[in-house]
Image: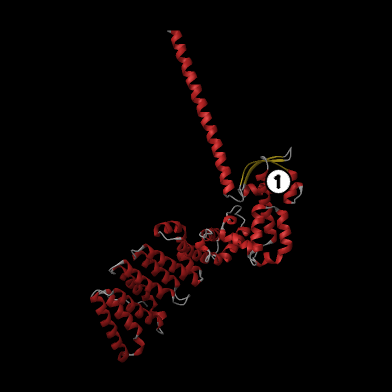
Amino acid sequence: MATIVNTTEEEPMLAVVRSTAQLAWADAGPEVADPEVARLCAEAQQHLLAGRWLDMATLMLASADLLLLSPSAPDKAADLECILTVICNLVTKAGSEDEALEIAKLICAKLTHQPPADKPTLRIKVLFSLYNLLPSLSGKAMVYRKALEVAAAAAGKAAADCVVPTFKNIDAFVAYWGIGKPEQRELFLAVTRILKDHKGMTKDYFKFLNKYLATFDGSADDADAIGAAKEEAAAAIVEFVKSSDLYQCDLLDMPAVAQLEKDDKYQPVYELLKIFLTQRLESYLAFQTANSTLLQGYGLVHEECITKMRLMSLLDLSGHCSGEIPYSAITKALEINDDEVEYWIVKAISSKILDCKVDQLNQLVIVSRHTVRVFGMPQWQSLRSKLGVWRGNIANAINTIQANKVTEDGGQGMQGLMIR
């Protein structure tokens, strides 16, 4: 049963100190409890009159801590949210943003240093309340990261569900807070740790792995930190290979991923990525023969890899043909029989990676669009050239139309003179 804290007759902060002290010392008997309650209330009164809000926060958090540590804490925990909300409100009374930030740091430390399984959803809710009360943008960013820290440590669905809905706004948050690359890196890494084991969030997990890895640009400033990204780089590769929905990525262009090429532990994983993005089924089969244990260790299923690699090989063929692919080229690249060609074409179309028509009579696949496995600088340059050509063609068409219109108008004018 929750305890009602009466705040009508005295300052809410003093009421909280009194109530938490009474609850915390209730089991000690009146001889011990009464002097302690009086001492804490007197100290709180002094801080309140002097406007020492940081000291008040320290005192109130200590009282709340006593409540948490008391033997009957589970019965009294229902009051904790109300108590912590009043404490959070201290940031609005602080004389400066710096003081408010220091108070916020104290509150965050108290909430994040509890046992991971100890009411994580309540602690996240309180942290979000603190976020809304803080005036400082850097403070908001810090509090949000602490909420993610609590959710990640709890390793439970309920805690993750508290923060996952906010992930769709991460880009807006980053712009609003104005945080730099190191802070963004820390933020994206925290998100990946929450999403990693969250069911149904594979695409988002891969997206935030990419965001994290993209914060490393290969500059001298990243030299010390980039080595810590190897595990996440390998995880991103594995997620890409596993996914039946992803057929294009920019991982090869990222310095955080490129470093794996010279790493003894992760070099085979990097080689696997290169095969999926730049080579065909034949190369994958050779790799699998030499590294079957490695693939199993990363949870990669050989049959699923073959399926994806056949589709990737079909994309590679589409990129190297002049718009028409003979059936014979498909059977060779995909290592299939003649009667299986149309099955794989339909599979590619249903996966939305290929638009084409099938000429059964001439045994040709006529490609109108295909997904490019790697869209890097060469692809951007090619697109720029195509747009330039299209722009020129449109300009020529407009000039032709305008010239014909002038000729037509002139002819009508001459005809009018002849009629007069």
Q: Quadrant of residue 318?
A: top right
Image: 203 above or below 143: above
The answer to whether residue 334 shows anywhere in this view is yes
Report x, y in % for residue 341.
72, 47
Q: Quadrant of residue 136?
A: bottom left
Name the residue at the bottom extreme.
31
Q: Helix, strand or loop at disc 1? A: helix
Residue at x 50%, y 27% (from the top left corner): 399
Image: 292 above or below 75: above
Q: Amino acid at mark 1?
A: Glu
* Residue position for label 1: 342
Q: Nearer the viewer, residue 145 or 331?
A: 145
* Left or right position of 222 against 270: left
Q: Nearer the viewer, residue 232 or 201?
A: 232
Residue at x 45%, y 57% (from the top left corner): 171
Report x, y in % for residue 50.
24, 76
* Left or right position of 233 against 40: right
Q: Quadrant of the C terminus?
A: top left
Report x, y in % for residue 312.
66, 51
Report x, y in % for residue 23.
34, 82
